[in-house]
Image: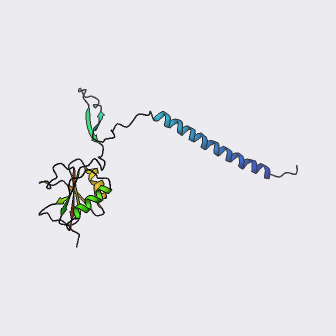
Amino acid sequence: MGGRGNGGNVARGAGFAAAKGAGLIGLAVVIGFVLLQVVDDGSEPAVEAEGNSDTTTTVPAAEGDDDDTTDTTAATAELTPDQLNVLVLNGSAPPGSAGSMSDALLQAGYTNQGEPSDWVDHEQTGNVVVCKEGLDREASSLAVAVGAGTLVEPFPDPVPPGSDESNCVVVVGAAAT
């Protein structure tokens, strides 16, 4: 046998395996790119940017139905903080608390607000967010902006004072003792 051992074959085998692996990864990237181009037809999502319009999902009638009608379900996009009409009320917190909360919410993007005021004869402990029906996602997002420990409750009846034009009301309550 010649003066060469198997060391050269091992080195060539490892180099070949590395090149083969790199080639497979490159092929996978190319296939992934092609599949993305085939699947993505470039159309925009059905929800408008304003978030105020309904999108409709149509479900075909079940087999065997003589009726050719379809059922539709409306879904609305979540209102952004600047689209949500918010009122901040003081519900037994120290004077000026509603104004301070309103300022903090302005910084968080809730720019569509009524004048903060007192909810006379209303007493509560802790902060509460109430939103009109259908605004559950907005209520949750607003509660996060208000701060830790904020409760989300259904819109009360009778409605809080001055909230006729509001989607949501933040009630700033007294601190827990």
**Observer-nearest of 40 and 99:** 99
**Observer-nearest of 77 and 83:** 83
Q: Is residue 9 above or below residue 100?
A: above
Residue 16 horizontal side relative to residue 71, left or right: right
Query: Looking at the rendering, in which quadrant would you find the C terminus?
Result: bottom left
Position in image of residue 165 (x %, y %): 18, 48
Q: Residue at x 68, y 47 (%)?
A: 17
Kindly indicate the quadrant of the structure image that contains residue 45. top left
Q: Residue at x 26, y 39 (%)?
A: 74
Q: How is the image coloured?
A: rainbow
Position in image of residue 36 (x %, y %): 49, 37
Q: Residue at x 71, y 45 (%)?
A: 16
**Observer-nearest of 98 and 84:** 98
Q: Is residue 64 above or below residue 147?
A: above
Q: Residue at x 25, y 34 (%)?
A: 71
Q: Looking at this rendering, what residue extends furthest in the bottom direction? A: 177
Position in image of residue 73 (x %, y %): 26, 38
